[in-house]
Every structure is written in structure tokens, then in C-alpha cells.
Amino acid sequence: MIVFFHPHLTIKFSSFISFSLMLQTNHLRGITSLAIHDSDNLLYSASLDSTVRIWRISDLRCIETIRAHAGPVNAIIIGEDGILYTGSNDATVKVWRRIICGGDQRLSLIVSLPTRSSPAKALALASDDMVLYVGCTDGCVYSYTKGCLSGHIQYSGALLGHNHAIMCLACVSNYVASGSADWTCRVWAREAVDHHTCLAVLHGHQGPITGVALFSIGGVDDNGEDGCTVCTGSIDGVLKIWRVTSLSNMGQGPSEGSWERYEQL
């Protein structure tokens, strides 16, 4: 460490270096989303500055920065296979893979998925990583399906019902939950890759729902009922916990659902 002395000022050179590194590696605007890929020991951060940065967890160093979109990056998510998905205000979701380039691994764009001219606000992957859900400001949740063998991603449909922007998404088992600025959370059952049934519309918050988490109840009981536990958080400052039950019709038609709120924090 080098220290410069002045009658009225002392500057530690090491502190200056640290500050310079911070300016070079930190996002220039707010961070909107984080994702971790455990097997690669990497942390991904998305920002309103339109970039995605990759951090090596072992030494907390930024090893790569990409200008991912033409607008703010609102959400990122990474699959078990290491595929990274980024959603932005530019009304696209981009799909990335790390490839070896000149001895180093770099993010490479695989495909850009349009989201019907609506900014993408939230992302979620089905438990098997085969379906990507994109929540947009038009109130729709768009689904994209990955081919089992080819890995090709294509648009497969939309989950309709919200009348305001989607703020958050979550998946567990074959269930999807969408929290919206319309103050409701909808819970969907995936009956097939391209077909979903809305099991419940959860009312009770006094503001937009900004966070949602899902837990599987686990298994079908003797009455043919399955379901999940849903946790919702809102701008109203309240956390609510719900139980949503799905009654399977054994292939005779779409599932039917019921729900009850059993805890409020």
C-alpha cells in the first residue's frame, strides 16, 4: 500500500485502486435481478443500465459484462443446463449460452424471443426446464417450449386473465403462479406443454403483488387431490399464505381447483 502525505490530506493508494475497480465493474444503474448457477460457481446480475454482469463467486470478481438489451433488463433466470434467459423493457427475451472462445468462456446469444411488443417484467422456468414463462406489462404470461432433442425454443401460448402488468412469477411441479399489479395472484396447472388451466384467483391484497413463492404439497391423496402452497407479498406490506388444491379429473377434462387463505403475516 502506498500512502501520500499532505499537511491537510492523506490519500491511501490502495483505496484509490479499490474505488477505480468499483467504477469499472459496478453497474451504472440499479440492479433488478440476480441468478446463481451453482455448478459454474457464477453469479449473474441484471441492471437498468441494460447490461448483465457475470461474477465469479470464489473471489467476487466481475469476469464479463455484456450489453444484453436495448433497454433496462428487468429479470434473469438460469436453468440447470446453464442456459441464461434475460427479459427487458425492449420487449424481448434473450437466450444465452456460455461457450469457449479463445480459451475463455463467454456468453453467446442463441435466440431473441419477441414478447408481443410488451416489456418483459418477470421470468420463470418450469421444474423440468422445458417451459419458459414470461410475464409482461400487458398482463399476459407467455410460454415458450424447449424441444426435448433439438433444444429449439418456440412460442406455445399465453396465460390470460390479469388486467394489469405481471410483477412476479414462480413455478413448482406442474404449477405456475403469477402476481400482478391488478392486486391478484393467479395459480395455473400445466395440463400439457401447451395447455394450462387457471385453478385459482387469489384476492385479498390492497396493492400490486410484487413477490410470489410456491411449495408443492406433494402427491395426490385418496380423493385425487393435489396442490401447492402459495406465498404472496405486496406493496401493502402484507405477506399472505394460501393453500390451493387441484382435483384431477383423471384425463376426462381440465383440473378443477379450490383455495383458502390460512395465514397472514
Image (cartoon, rainbow, N blue to C red):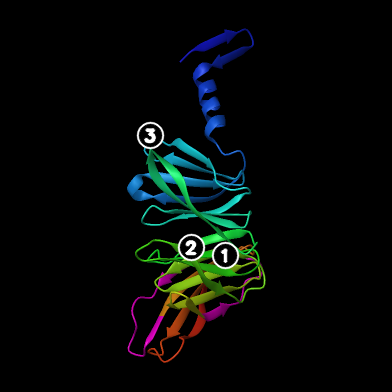
Residue 114 colored magenta?
A: no
Under circle 1, the secondary element is strand
Numbered mark located on residue 102 in the image: 3
Q: Amino acid at mark 2?
A: Ala
Front-most of residues 177 and 128: 128
Q: Which residue is mark 1?
A: 135
Q: Residue at x 50, y 46 (%)?
A: 45
Left-right relation of 95 to 164: left
Q: Which residue is mark 2?
A: 124
Q: Amino acid at mark 1?
A: Gly
Q: Amino acid at mark 3?
A: Gly
Under circle 2, the secondary element is strand
Label 3, label 1: how many angstroms apart (C-alpha)?
36 Å
Q: Quadrant of residue 90?
A: bottom right
Q: Position of residue 171 (x, y in %)?
A: 45, 67
Q: Quadrant of residue 141?
A: bottom right
Q: Range of the magenta residues?
A: 198-226
Image quarter where the N terminus lies is top left
Q: Residues within 10 Å of mark 3 (few under 14, many from 20)?
A: few
Q: Residue at x 43, y 37 (%)?
A: 60
* Circles 2, 3 touching at the beta carbon (< 8 Å): no
